[in-house]
């Protein structure tokens, strides 16, 4: 039985079609994952389906018995708001209906007019249809299940960690007893226990549409995948693992077809050039006709990998030393006794449960917060740069190019556009930074890191909002970076890709109180030894990366014709595959070795 359907849906963003001709149906009992690369419109589509925005063409048709509850990736509570009013503000239509009903009640005089009473009755009927006061009671019950400290209820909610606020938002979603849940990247900020808790909750929800980038989380949870494309939705009635396998097979088939068509085109063009005049001119004309009828290569299913190129100012020796550090908010200590030594080549992942103080530690190391105890010393002339969980900008109205030049310090317009092209943002160069999606904001912030030339990079949950391709490109760049890196993350896979030391703050549920406390001392890693690679692989990687940059810049040209865009996309697919093979050979040439030196 359909709960919601849509037809010919289209949306314009930044004077261009973000997507068009979208059709779909959500049936009762359908658990669907919505996937696509960053910036392609996943959140925008969810907002259209939830009635939060209007489409530029087409329409959404909700069923008469639909009760929809939605949770969005954006979360910016007022600084002083306490937990209970924050949770109630998340109840969406219920909160609005309650306010309207209370305002109508307050407006009644001692002798209300019949029209006022009818309006009051209408508002009360709507409030009851949304669950009435039972929803508020259920919210209290759901919040009571979160195992929050008593002190958390009195604190401003903005002081809670991103993961703690995410749990509150999921509790508010559950309180609404909706027939359809819409979730926009709910795994962001959640620690290991939080993800397991969310999965258990979703296993009890009959119908939902979810955006998430974690394949391990989605496997076994969804039974359908919608892959959003500019001109439609590709529907896979498969579990997530089977979808990934089917997608890889399609990519392989398209790459083979592109290669075949490219070879055939090259042969025809070579014949025409050689025999365009002379005795075989008629045969060359025949080849021209065949060339004109030759179909274009199929568009690539996978965007080119954006691999940041982090540089450094070349500082040697100890870059940052934190001794017997205590960090917290106000006078409230979250973590203490921390000693961290960072040198060129240091890689440190900070892990731990939500609310343990990971973000606070990074803000302290970045110089945004003062230590509550201990001290931080920087090497002479060492510069730090960092990316927050949810990047914000001093002037949200600046377009991307002006932001990079005025805020980040990129010297020229051309360099700014080239940097944006490498991160897939060139098409948005005239867009205000405040209008970017979550994934686009994260990519812009990482582009700013690349331009900083800092010796110490601090990244707070950088994989939030990034698709798998972008995550892998970021990890590869951080591994190659010659400076020091500190990353706070709940993504175990990303930490493994970094080959980093780990500093755990706090204890997860189930860890025994009497167990040895996780070490709070970061192990110092010796400067990374230069990689020993075969010269041909090194040269090939450099050449392929230059070509990736060139293709990204060319594909960002809004004046490209569709055939040219498809041709460049096909080449980008081939070059990306070649680059992955080259990096695999690079890694094999390095060997496993004996690992980094430790003190």
Image (spheres, helix red, strand yellow):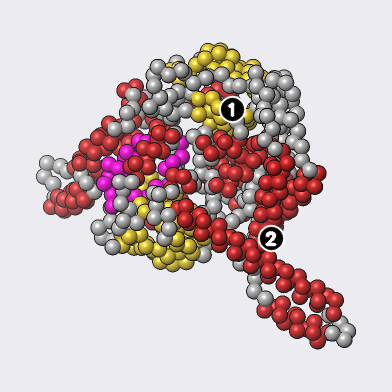
Q: Nearer the viewer, residue 391 or 12?
A: 391
Q: Which residue is mark 1?
A: 501
- The crowding category of the residue bearing disc 1, from other C-alpha atoms within 10 Å (few below 14, some 14 to 19, many at least 20), is some
The spot of residue 150 in percent (x, y) is: 31, 23
* SS under mark 1: strand
- Work out whether residue 465 can be spotted: yes
Q: Nearer the viewer, residue 526 or 66?
A: 526
Q: Which residues fall within the magenta stretch?
A: 167-189
Closer to us: mark 1 or mark 2?
1
Q: Earlier in the sequence, mark 1 or mark 2?
A: 1
> Splitting the image into 4 quarters, where does residue 513 fall?
top left
> Splitting the image into 4 quarters, where does residue 593 fall?
top right
Residue 181 sits inside the magenta stretch: yes
- Work out whether residue 436 can be spotted: no
Residue name at image x 12 percent, y 41 percent: 110
User: From mark 1 to mark 2, how far is it between C-alphas?
Assistant: 38 Å
View extreme (right): residue: 278
The spot of residue 377 in percent (x, y) is: 64, 17
Residue 571 is marked as 2
């Amino acid at each position: 039985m359909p709960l919601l359907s849509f037809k010919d849906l289209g949306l314009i963003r930044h004077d261009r079609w973000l997507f068009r001709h979208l059709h779909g149906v959500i049936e009762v009992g359908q658990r669907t994952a919505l996937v696509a690369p960053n910036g392609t419109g996943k959140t925008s589509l969810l907002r259209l389906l939830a009635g939060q925005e209007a489409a530029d063409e087409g329409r959404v048709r909700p069923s008469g018995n639909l009760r929809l509850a939605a949770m969005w990736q954006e979360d910016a509570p007022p600084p002083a708001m306490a937990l209970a009013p924050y949770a109630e503000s998340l109840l969406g239509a219920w909160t609005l209906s309650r306010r309207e009903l209370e305002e109508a009640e307050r407006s009644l005089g001692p002798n209300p007019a019949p029209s006022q009473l009818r309006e009051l009755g209408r508002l009360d009927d709507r409030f009851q249809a949304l669950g009435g006061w039972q929803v508020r009671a259920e919210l209290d019950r759901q919040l009571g299940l979160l195992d929050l400290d008593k002190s958390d209820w009195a604190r401003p909610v903005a002081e809670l960690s991103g993961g703690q606020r995410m749990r509150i938002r999921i509790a508010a979603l559950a309180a609404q007893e909706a027939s359809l849940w819409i979730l926009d990247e709910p795994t962001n900020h959640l620690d290991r226990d939080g993800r397991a808790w969310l999965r258990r909750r979703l296993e009890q929800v009959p119908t939902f549409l979810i955006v998430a980038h974690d394949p391990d989380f989605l496997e076994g949870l969804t039974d359908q995948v919608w892959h959003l494309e500019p001109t439609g939705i590709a529907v896979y009635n498969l579990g997530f693992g089977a979808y990934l396998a089917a997608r890889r097979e399609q990519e392989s088939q398209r790459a083979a077809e592109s290669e075949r068509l490219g070879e055939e085109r090259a042969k025809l063009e070579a014949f025409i050039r050689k025999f365009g005049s002379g005795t075989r001119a008629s045969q060359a004309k025949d080849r021209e006709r065949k060339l004109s009828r030759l179909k274009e290569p199929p568009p690539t299913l996978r965007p080119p990998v954006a691999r940041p190129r982090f540089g450094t100012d070349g500082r040697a020796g100890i870059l940052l030393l934190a001794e017997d550090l205590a960090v917290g908010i106000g006078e409230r200590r979250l973590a203490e006794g921390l000693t961290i030594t960072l040198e060129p080549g240091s890689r440190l992942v900070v892990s731990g449960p939500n609310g343990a103080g990971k973000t606070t530690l990074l803000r302290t190391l970045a110089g945004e917060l003062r230590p509550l105890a201990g001290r931080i010393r920087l090497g002479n002339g060492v510069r730090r740069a960092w990316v927050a969980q949810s990047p914000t900008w001093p002037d949200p109205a600046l377009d991307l190019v002006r932001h990079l030049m005025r805020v980040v310090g990129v010297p020229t317009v051309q360099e700014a556009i080239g940097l944006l092209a490498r991160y897939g943002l060139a098409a948005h160069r005239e867009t205000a930074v405040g209008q970017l999606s979550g994934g686009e904001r994260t990519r812009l912030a990482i582009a700013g890191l690349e331009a900083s030339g800092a010796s110490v990079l601090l990244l707070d949950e950088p994989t939030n909002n990034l698709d798998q391709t972008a995550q892998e490109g970021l990890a590869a760049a951080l591994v190659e970076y010659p400076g020091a890196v500190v990353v706070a993350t709940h993504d175990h896979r990303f930490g493994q890709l970094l080959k980093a030391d780990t500093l755990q703050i706090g204890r997860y549920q189930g860890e025994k109180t009497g167990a040895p406390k996780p070490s709070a001392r970061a192990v110092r890693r010796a400067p990374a030894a230069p990689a020993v690679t075969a010269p041909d692989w090194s040269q090939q990687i450099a050449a392929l990366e230059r070509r990736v940059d060139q293709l990204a810049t060319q594909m960002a040209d809004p004046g490209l014709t569709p055939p040219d865009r498809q041709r460049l996309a096909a080449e980008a697919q081939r070059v990306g595959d070649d680059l992955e093979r080259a990096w695999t050979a690079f890694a094999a040439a390095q060997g496993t070795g004996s690992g980094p030196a430790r003190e």
